Image: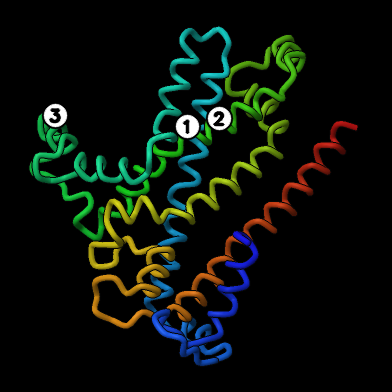
Amino acid sequence: MFVFYPIFAALFYALHDWSGFNSDLVFVGLGNFVALFHDPIFWDAFKRSMIFLLGTVPLQMGLSLVLAVLLNNQLLKLSSFFRTMVFLPVVTPVAVMGIVWTFLLSPFNGPINGILLDLGMISRPIDFLGKSENVMGSVILVYVWKWLGLTMIYWLAALQTVPDEVYDAARLDNCRGARLIRHVVLPIILPFALAILLISAVGALNVFPLIMSMTNGGPFFASEVMEIFIYRTAFATGDGSIPRLGYAAAAGVLFGGVVLALTIVQALASRASKGKVEGATT
């Protein structure tokens, strides 16, 4: 009821021209999809989603892996405390966090601008969320900060699968530090890395609450990703236009197809990497 009905309903409405406020559904077939392919606003939103994906996932996975390796060391004191501190933003409500970060990044008495001014790093306040050239980078950094702890937990779970005997054997061969991580640990946790990559990628494509609470897709649509485009098209909030629920459903179907494609690619890559690992083991 809560999974399959929305999927088939989206497919059904995508084939119709419907505002959502009356019972007059006009069947247009693939007309909505054809219109989307010729809609530059749709492609701009799609491009921003891809930019957001490419901007968040590598940074999020790289930083979280470094933190996981450091905090996985049993000799490190207070490692549990640091894990908790890194994970704390994950359990913070997204809407509340978005509002708080809007205040922190404000050019008008915002603490971050105040610190940068006091350190002499800038000569005047930076409008992080009010200028088109700054907004995506700012939202990307906030998103990475928000979900860094969750990705770190995934890496920690992967690192726990590496047997202690492997570390001992590597140290006997004088393989330590970065060499140990690169040549011993990373090949073992590669299948987990692909799963973490997929989870991070899908999460980066579902960023509606954060952007809605921080920028509402602005300024001048500079942070309007696919989810904001779908929402605005379906409900036409604030721009005076007529809602187009069928058109928005078609956009949602196409966007869902992209997520499905990522899932299929990950499944194939995971199967291939698992086969390589098993082959190397035998």
Residue occupied by mark 1 = 149
Q: Mark 1 and mark 2 in contact (Cβ < 8 Å)?
A: yes
Q: How many numbered circles are shown?
A: 3
Question: Dot 1: few (<14), some (14–19), or many (≥20) neighbours within 10 Å?
Answer: many
Relative to 255, say whether 82 is above or below.
above
Q: Dividing the picture into quarters, in which one does residue 81 lie? A: top left
Relative to 146, say whether 216 is above or below.
below
Q: Secondary structure at mark 2?
A: helix
Q: Secondary structure at mark 1?
A: helix
Q: Earlier in the sequence, mark 2 or mark 3?
A: 3
Relative to 249, say whether 194 is above or below.
above
Q: Earlier in the sequence, mark 3 or mark 1?
A: 3
Query: Rounded to the nearest whole Å, what is the CA distance between mark 2 and mark 1?
Result: 6 Å
Query: Rounded to the nearest whole Å, what is the CA distance between mark 2 and mark 3?
Result: 34 Å
Q: Secondary structure at mark 3?
A: loop
Q: Dividing the picture into quarters, in which one does residue 243 lie? A: bottom left
Give residue 138's position: percent from left, percent from top.
30, 47
- Color style of the picture: rainbow
Nearer to the camera, 244 or 20: 20
Look at label 1 and name its amino acid.
Gly
Residue occupied by mark 3 = 119
Query: Rounded to the nearest whole Å, what is the CA distance between mark 3 and mark 1?
Result: 29 Å
Residue occupied by mark 2 = 153
Question: Dot 2: few (<14), some (14–19), or many (≥20) neighbours within 10 Å?
Answer: some
Residue displayed at 58% across by 46% down: 199
Residue displayed at 58% across by 23% down: 178
Q: Quadrant of the N terminus?
A: bottom right
Closer mark to the observer between disc 3 and disc 1: 1
Residue displayed at 57% across by 14% down: 73
